Image: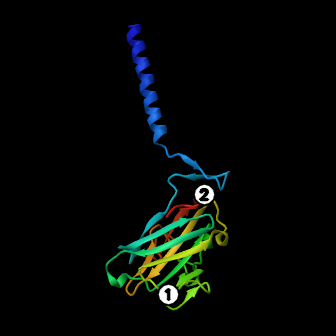
Amino acid sequence: MKKSHYFITKAAVVIAAILLSMIVGSCKKDISDPSLPKHTLKSDCGQSSYTLWAGQNINAGNLLVWNDETNLYIEYQITSTDPNLALNELHLWAGKDINECPDNNNGNPKVGQFPYYANPTSSTPAGYPYLTNSLDYTLTIPLNDIQASCEDIVYVAAHGKSTTETMWGAGTRFVPSGGNWATYSTYTICCGGATK
């Protein structure tokens, strides 16, 4: 009886060790980033993709977000073959505190007060590129402008308009019940920069 108990105990220890090594081995490992010795670059750190919804339930394309050591990049990418969903204009706000996003008394965002704007003939801030490609447009926001750094969570309110529909990047509704369907996404700043 003692012998069988010994073998069962030993087998349980071996199985537990195998399971533990499988769990530890499957975890993502950090990679040292020589440019930021006090930080690590996550091996899964990279571009985040959110659906760009038109009219609440039409998949118009993607909102891609990534960063390098100095800038946050947000790309509107229209992949729909419907020509009516091409962008005519866009408004964007990004920051570390969603409560700083311009809104009205009901909590709905005021896109006309967003700091980034583009259409085919004008843009904000001054000198920012016009919307010359209605299917693909990338905004570059210096991380210093939004006071964001390694591992900070950034909120992104990405609004677009086509000839027929309003668009928002997938995420959380500003006003959970009632109000309009405006949404914001969240992105974590990658240490040392993400890869697109």
**Label 1 crowd (10 A; few <14 / some 14-19 / many >=20):** many
Q: What amino acid type is highlighted by mark number 2?
A: Cys
Q: Is residue 181 visible?
A: no
Q: Quadrant of the N terminus?
A: top left
Dot 1: element: loop
- Would residue 73 appear left or right of 34 to someone viewing this image? left
Element carrying mark 2: loop
Q: Is residue 101 above or below residue 7?
A: below
In the rendered image, the residue lying farthest to the bottom is 121
x then y, percent, for residue 62: 42, 70
Rendered residue at 62%/66% (across/down):
96
Please state which amino acid type lies under the numbered disc 1: Asn
* Residue annotated with mark 2: 191
Q: Which residue lies most toward the left here?
A: 81
Which tag, 1 or 2, sits closer to the chain's start? 1
Instruction: Return the residue at label 1.
Output: 119
Judge from the rendering whether residue 104 lies leftward or rightward of residue 23; answer left or right.
right
- Left or right of 81 in this view: 25: right
Q: Residue 19: x, y in percent?
A: 43, 32
